[in-house]
Amino acid sequence: MAKVVVIGGGYGGITVAGGLDDVADVTLIEKRDQFVHHAAALRAAVDSGWGHTIFMPYSKLVSNGNVVHGTVQRVDGHTVYVSGHEPIEADYLVLATGTSYPYPAKYNVTESEVAKARLSQTRENLARARRVMLVGAGTVGVEFAGEISSNFPDTEIVMVDKADTILGTPGYVDELRDTITGQLRERGVRLVLGSPLAYMPGSDVGVLSPFEVETVDGQKIEGDIWFLCYGARTNSDYLVSSFGNVMRPNGQINVDKHLQVKDHPGIFAVGDITDVKESKRADAARAHARVVISNIRDLIAGQNMTTSYEPGKEWVILPLGPDGGASQLVTRDGTIEVVGPRETADIKGTDLMVSMVRNQLHLQ
């Protein structure tokens, strides 16, 4: 039976592992002891009912292979070196280590109980805080403002961004920005835009500790707790020694149309770690994974790879808590349509796709 090794147990990684389990001996290498459903992480930071929901075991993911918990030190050819473990050999290797991001959008700790304890403390701190500052008014900042305002409606929230509008990067239509801006203002969120902070607070993110800062243009902001809502970083340091020739300055890996790493036959990459020109999203990682599953199945069967990846139509789903938000959709004819809270809740806002992920992990 062919040996497939998947490095990274996020959305793309679990899709590949589960999708090849019937035709290969699959080893999933993941440093965390449980899967973390990061799409719901911001809600878990404000709602205790979600504190355990976003953590799910890997125990039922594969039946022919296994899950190894450890940190990958390096990859040499098709050999993976994992801390505390013997080297692992692969016939086919899939890189799926994604990106890291400031807490609480993502968690960098490996033990779920430690993450749960920090989440519990964060919720307690938010409940006691009168003023919250969010640095960054992109999708994470907007969604977090929605979660905080839904659970703590009396809390003053200020969002700071150097851009002149929320969602300041390309890819968003003005109608979406205007709709979300209106809902945030209805919730009393103060927007401080057009100038970055001159300096950050002295306290760590999520810690209850009063502070005062100011923007470069002199606007003063007082708060009790703050969070950083930008700063994704590609998790590819373990590849530098062997894959430097196909690695971009931002750490992303160069892949071909089959999502095979350039100049490295039998090694594939999916999700945020790839240099595919599209926004980095969980649904894109799953789409990558389906292409890689098909191509590895072809190779195992002794055939040429037949499936190529083309970036699809990108939807932007922005819930503001369970009952707010807006979404930027692309219709079949390619036109953009902006819909409001009800449609957004139907797509993501209520369940935050927990059921779908539990199904992938064979937990229901």
Image (cartoon, rainbow, N blue to C red):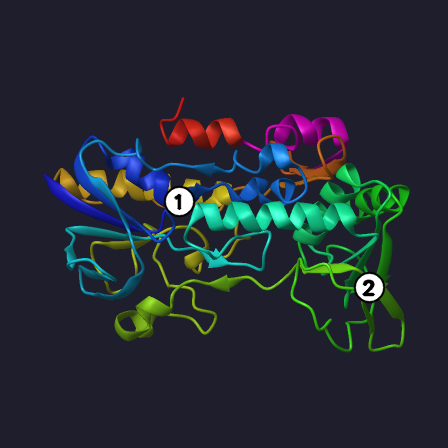
Choose top left, top right, bottom left or bottom right for residue 364.
Answer: top left
Which residue type does callout 1 highlight? Gly
**Image mark for residue 164:** 2
How packed is label 2: few (under 14 Cα within 10 Å), some, or many (20 or more)?
Answer: few
Position of residue 359 measured from the top left corner of the image (x, y, whole percent): 41, 26
Position of residue 322 measured from the top left corner of the image (x, y, whole percent): 71, 31
180 vs 287, left or right, is right
Tell me if I can see residue 303 in this picture: no
Task: Give, as a single range, the part of the protein colored magenta.
Answer: 337-353
**Image mark for residue 221:** none
Identify the residue under disc 1: 12
- Please tell me whether mark 2 sits on a helix, a strand or a loop: loop
> How many numbered marks does the figure carry?
2
Position of residue 275 measured from the top left corner of the image (x, y, whole percent): 44, 60
Front-most of residues 5 and 293: 5
Q: 277 above or below 188?
A: below
11 vs 3, left or right, is right
Q: CA distance from mark 1 to mark 2?
A: 34 Å
Front-most of residues 159 and 92: 159
Q: Are marks 1 and 2 in contact (CB under 8 Å)?
A: no
